[in-house]
Image (cartoon, coloured by chain):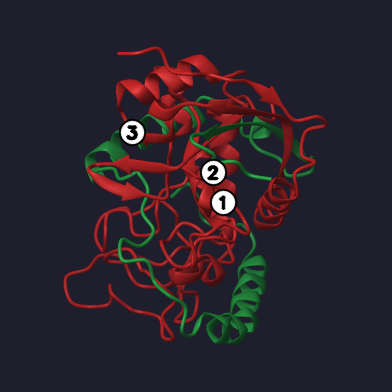
Chain colours: A green, B red
Amino acid sequence: MLYRLPVALSALLSLAAVVVATPASLERLYGLERRSTGRSCGSHLTPEAVSQKEEAFASRLAQKPAANRVSSATVFTVSIHLHIITFNGEGDIE
Amino acid sequence: MTDPLVLFSHSDPPGRDPRIEEQLDVLNNDYSRSDLLFQLAGTTRIENEEWFNITSGSTQETDMKTSLRVGDAGILNIYTVGEAYGDGDSVLGYATFPDEYEANPALDGVVLLYTTFPGGSLAPYNLGRTLTHEIGHWVGLYHTFQGGCNGDGDLIDDTPAEAAATYGCPTTNPDTCSGEGHDRKSTFMCSPSGSVTYLRSLPAIYNFMDYTDDSCMDNFTPGQIIRLQEQTSEYRGIRT
C-alpha cells in the first residue's frame, strides 16, 4: 500500500493527542443543535471511480524516482483567491 | 437569461477582515502537520443573484467559475455562497479533486456557504472546519467513510473504516465495521516495517474528513498527510 506509515511514533503521538482532546470536545458538544441535513459535500464517488483515479495516480508515482518524491523539509505556500458572492445585503464576510 | 449583476470590489489589504483572518488561522492550524501554508492573495466581492444559490454542475456554476477563477492548478479559488446544492441535497460545500484539474481547469476550486466561516450562523458548522474538510478534497483526500467497510475505502491505511458518515459528535466511537464479512477493520495503524497493528481508540469521528460537527474534528492522520503531499505534488505543481 502506498500510505503505510514510516514512523510508528508519530501515530502514537496522534493517538495521544486525540485521547487528550476528547473529553473536553465532548463536554463542549453536549446539547449542541444538530442540523437536520447534517454536514454534506458534493464529493461522493463510487468505489469504481476511486479505483480508476488511484490506478492513474499510482502509475504517475511509479514513474518518478523515489529521491524526487515528497520531502517535508520545506513549507509550501498555497495562495488563496476568495470570491465572496453576495445578494440583497447577504453573504458578506467581514 | 438576464445578464447577472456583477460588482467587483477588492479588499485592501487582503485578509484584513477579522472573520477571514480567523478562517485562515483555522486552516493553518488544521494543516499544521502538513507542509502547506495557506495565504490570502486576494478577496473579491461580487453581487450576483444567480450565483448566490449555486448547484454543483449547473450552468450558473460554470458561468461563475469561468468569470472569476484566477491562477493555475496550485492556486486555491474559494467561492462563498448563500446556498449550495449537490446531488439534489443542500450541502455545506463541495470541492474538486486534484486529478480533475487537467480536464476541467476552469471548474477547479472550493464552493461553500459563507455561514460556515468562523462566527457564522450555521452552528454547529460555524467554526471554519467546512473549509478544512473541502480543502481536504482539493488536496486529494476522500471521506473516511469512502467505500464503507469493504474494499480500499479512502485508500489510507491509518484511518479506520466506517460504514457511513458520522454526524454530531458521538460520546462513544461507533465501531461500524467490525462485524463478519468486512474486509476492512475498524482501527489500525502501520509500523515502519509495514506490519499492521490494530487499535481501538483512533476513531474517524474526530477526523477532518468525516461529517461530524466542527468542534468534534481535530486531526488528519499521518497517512492522510502523506497522501495530500503526494497528490498536490503530482497534480497541482506544489513542491516542484
- The total number of labels drawn is 3
Q: Residue lying furthest front in this view? A: A88
Q: Are marks 2 and 3 on the same chain?
A: yes
* Quadrant assignment for the C terminus of chain B: top right
Residue nearer the viewer, B174 or A94:
A94
Check if mark 2's residue and mark 1's residue have beta carbons within 8 Å. Answer: yes
- Mark 1 lies on a secondary structure that is helix
Left or right for B56, reference A93: left
Tag 1 residue: B132
Residue nearest the viewer, comparing B103 with A73:
B103
* Amino acid at circle 1: Thr
Q: Disc 2 on helix, strand or loop?
A: helix
If the image is split into quadrants, where does the N terminus of chain B sit? top left
Work out whether A8 lies above or below A88.
below
Q: Does the rendering let one see residue A22?
A: yes
Q: What's the residue at 51%, 24% (across, down)?
A: A63
Relative image position of residue B218 (x, y in whole percent): 59, 66
Q: Which residue is mark 3?
A: B56
Report the residue at 63% width, 20% height from top. Answer: B8
Location of residue A78 by image quarter:
top right
One can see residue B196 in this view: no
Mark 2 — residue? B135
